[in-house]
Image: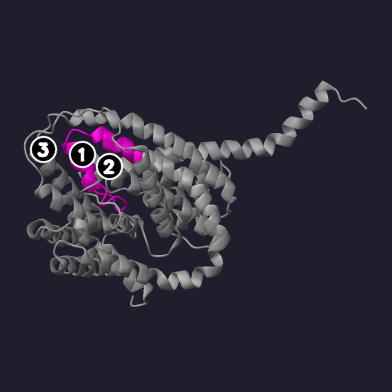
Amino acid sequence: MTVSWDTIRLVYPRRFQPVINVLFGIVLGAAVGIGCGAVSGLVPGIHANTMAGVLLSLQALLLAWFDPVVVASAMFATLVTHTFLDNVPGTFLGIPDADTSLAVLPAHALCLEGRGEEAVRISALGSAVGVALSLPLALAFVLFLPALQPAIDWGIGLVVLAVAGYLIVVSESPGWALAVFSVSGVLGLFSLGYSFLAWPAGGESGVLMPLLSGLFGIAVLLKASHGAMPAQHFTGIELPGGAIRRCSLLGSAAGALVGWLPGLSNATANTLLTSVVGYDSNPREYILATSAANTVNAFLGLAAFYAISRTRSGVMAAISALEEMPPATAVLLAGAIAAVGAYLLTVLLSPTAGWFGGVNVTNLNYGVIAFVALLSLFLCGPFGGLVLLLATAVGCVPALVNIRRVYCMGAIMVPVMAYSFGII
C-alpha cells in the first residue's frame, strides 16, 4: 500500500495541530509573562503577585481568545522573570523588594564602589544557575516529601528558631542583637496582624513594602555616603568557580526549603544564608546565593502546588483560581522559556549602571526616600506611613549599636514562628 505525498500533507499537520497549539500557547504566555515580570521587577512596589492578580481579573476576556495554558504560563513566567529583575532597582537605588531585602545591602554597596553592573550580572548568573538546579530538586521533593509533610509543617518554627538563635549567639553584641530581633519581630506581628487597616491597592501582602523598605531601605539611605556616585565600570565577575558552585548549591537548597515549606519566603531564605555566607564579608557570594534561592523558590512553589495542592505565593493562588488547570509540564516549560528571556534582559539592562556615574548620592537618596514614602502612602494609606516610620526607627538601631542589620529580619521570622507554633 502506497501513501501519496498529498495524503501526508493533509493528515500529519492535523495530527500535530494540538501539540502546535499548546506550544504556541506556552510561548505566547511566556512572552506576556516576561513583559509583566519586567514591569513588576523594575518598578518598586509592584510585585509579581500584583501582575498575576491583574491577569486573573482579565481571565474571562483572555479565555475568550486564548487557551487556559496561555494564562497560567503568563502568570508563572511573570514570577520567574520577576526573580531575575527585582535586584536591579535595589542595586542602583537601594530600594529593597520583599524578596531581596538583605541582598540589597551588598548589591547597592557594590554600586557605590562603581561595580553596579557586576552586581546585576552576578544576580542574573545566580538566578540562571537556580533554574538549572531547581528541576532535579523539584523532582526529588515531589517524590519523597509529600508523605512527610505533616512532620515538616510542625518543624518549620523550630528550624527558624534555631537559625535565629544561632545568629544572635554569634553576634558582636548578643544582647543588642536579641533586642533588635525582638522589637522588629513585634513590629512584624503588628504590621501583618493589622494589615487589614492598609488600603487594598497594595494587595494582601502590601504592608511588607513599607515594613522592609523602612528596615532595609530608608534606614540605610539615611546613613549612606555622600558626594557623587563613582563612575561605573565592568571588568568581569570577580568570583572563582569554586565559590560559584558552592553558593549556587547553598542558595538553591535555601530556596527549595522556603519554596516547599508553608509560611516561609525569600526573605527567610536570605536570613538562612547569612549563617553560612556573610553579606558584608562576601557580598558577591551572597548576591549569587540569594538570587539562586529567589528563583528556585518560584519553581519549588510550583512543584508544591501540583504535588500537595498548596499555594506558596500569590501567583500560585492565582493559578489555582483558573477555571481549567493546565498540566504542570506546560507551565514549567513556560517558566524555563521566561528564564532565558529574563536572563538576556537582565544582562542587557546591566550597563545602565553607567547612567548613575557622577550622580549626586545625597540628592538621589533623598529622592528615593521621598518616592518610597509616597509609594507606601499610595499602596497602604496612613497605616503604611505609620509602618514605614516605625520600621525606619527600628532600622536605624543596628548602625547605632554596631551590629549587623540581619537581626531586623525578626520582622519576618517571628511571625513565621508564631504561625508555625499555632500562636496566630
Where does label 3 land, which residue?
Answer: 361
Percent across and percent down for residue 268 are 32, 59
At horizontal 36% and vertical 71% (from top left) the residue drawn is 157
Percent across and percent down for residue 65 are 56, 41
Report if the CB atoms under discs 2 and 1 are less than 8 Å apart. Answer: yes
Where does label 2 land, which residue?
Answer: 284
Marked residue nearer the N-terminal end (3 or 1): 1
- In the picture, residue 339 is in which quadrant? top left
Range of magenta residues: 95-124
Identity, as a three-letter code, of the amino acid under mark 2: Arg
Judging from the image, what secondary structure is the residue with disc 3 in? Answer: helix
The quadrant the N terminus occupies is top right
**Residue 120 colored in magenta in the image:** yes
At horizontal 71% and vertical 35% (from top left) the residue drawn is 16
Identity, as a three-letter code, of the amino acid under mark 3: Val
- In the picture, residue 266 is in which quadrant? bottom left
